Image (spheres, rainbow, N blue to C red):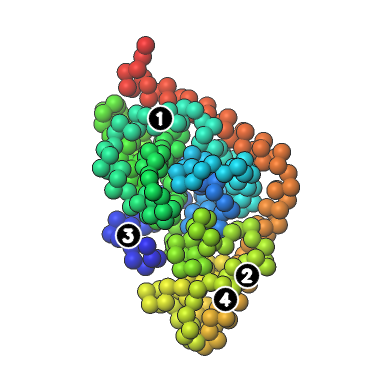
Amino acid sequence: MSATTLTRSQLASRHRADALDARIEQDPAAFRMLSGDRPTGALHVGHYFGSLHNRVRLQDAGIDLFVVIADYQAMTDRVVPPDLPDLVAGLVADYLAIGIDPRRSTIFAHSQIAALNQLLLPFLGLVSVAEIGRNPTVKDEISAAGLATVSGLMFTYPVHQAADILFCHANLVPVGLDQLPHLEITRTVARRFNERYSPGRPYFREPEALLSAAPLLLGTDGQKMSKSRNNSIPLRASADETARLLGKAKTDAEKVISFEPQRRPEVANLLSLTALCRGSTPEEVADEIGNRGAAALKAAAIDAVNERFAEVRARRAELAADPGYLRTVLAAGNERATAIADDTLRAVRELMNQRY
Ligand code: TRP
């Protein structure tokens, strides 16, 4: 999916997101926000501009934020990595380094929240196999992973994601474009649950996507930037690593640098990345580089990323040196999420007439 070819439903979501921003500013307390990531590797600049910066921005605007570490989802397309605990701690460190504040926000791992996982069962009863099978993001992931067989966990993880969101009654989900199909499933689950089990008095809210205004960033190979595709710039990369990674980014041989996302997607991507880091526009960056070609563009991108993330990287290094603290933060988040999930499951059982 390229940054410039939005489908109609994506465009509609983006318009909705603009209107949403205005409502958030007026009444932040009306919102609870949930978003999250798989513990499959270091968070990267694509995550940052696609979703993470929105989480921090809205947390700081006064919205209650929940962040799920999706450790079951991490097992949809791979075996359990032996270093899973380190990957989870690494995510917590990334979150804190970018400014998620554990005193105001709740960071938890979904495997630790028993009642959240149990919600998957009633939710699976609300969607058809055909609906699940149409999910384009799941299809992409299956083909990207080159899986010979597709597990039930892989096939149904968008429904599990509905449990991640609905257990805490989140109504706002800051995500990248690729997550919109999952959010649609969550909305469907909420709506059908209400229709079937709580008519006239909706129990679940239908959450809304909050899309970032930033374009979807591509990886250094021109494909979707992804932790598992080895084409990303990790937030925590050193300045030298950043230089090495961006140094090998795909570009083209035209000397004059121009912002033409359709014709020159890789060049446009480096321009977007540089502009996002600097808070300027890709066109401005292109003008500045002029006819100095891809080498000058890469040098500008490297400087921009290194400057933008210097402070985050320093903070992250400090946090990584204190694993005990990271564990405490996660334990507190798990405890808070568990209390909420227990309440939700109790209410769901009541509504489903499971009173024995
Ligand atoms: N599917 C998301 C990803 O691959 C991670 C995720 C899990 C998520 N549960 C979520 C995102 C709930 C938003 C809301 O990155």
Residue at horizontal 63 percent and vertical 70 percent from the top:
243
Distance from label 3 to label 4 (Cα)?
A: 31 Å
The residue that label 1 is drawn on is 119
Asked if labels 3 and 1 touch by Cβ distance under 8 angstroms, the answer is no
Choose top left, top right, bottom left or bottom right for residue 157. top left
The residue that label 2 is drawn on is 244
| Tag nearer the camera, 1 or 3 | 1
Distance from label 4 to label 2 (Cα)?
A: 10 Å
Label 4's element?
A: helix
Residue at horizontal 55 percent and vertical 86 percent from the top:
292
The residue that label 3 is drawn on is 11
Q: Amino acid at mark 1?
A: Leu
Label 3's element?
A: helix
Q: Position of residue 64 (x, y in %)?
A: 52, 41
Q: Position of residue 213 (x, y in %)?
A: 44, 61
Label 2's element?
A: helix
Is residue 150 toward the left or the right of residue 312 in the image?
left
Say above or below: 94 vs 285.
Answer: above
Label 1's element?
A: loop
Q: Quadrant of the N terminus?
A: bottom left
Asked if labels 4 and 3 touch by Cβ distance under 8 angstroms, the answer is no
The residue that label 4 is drawn on is 298
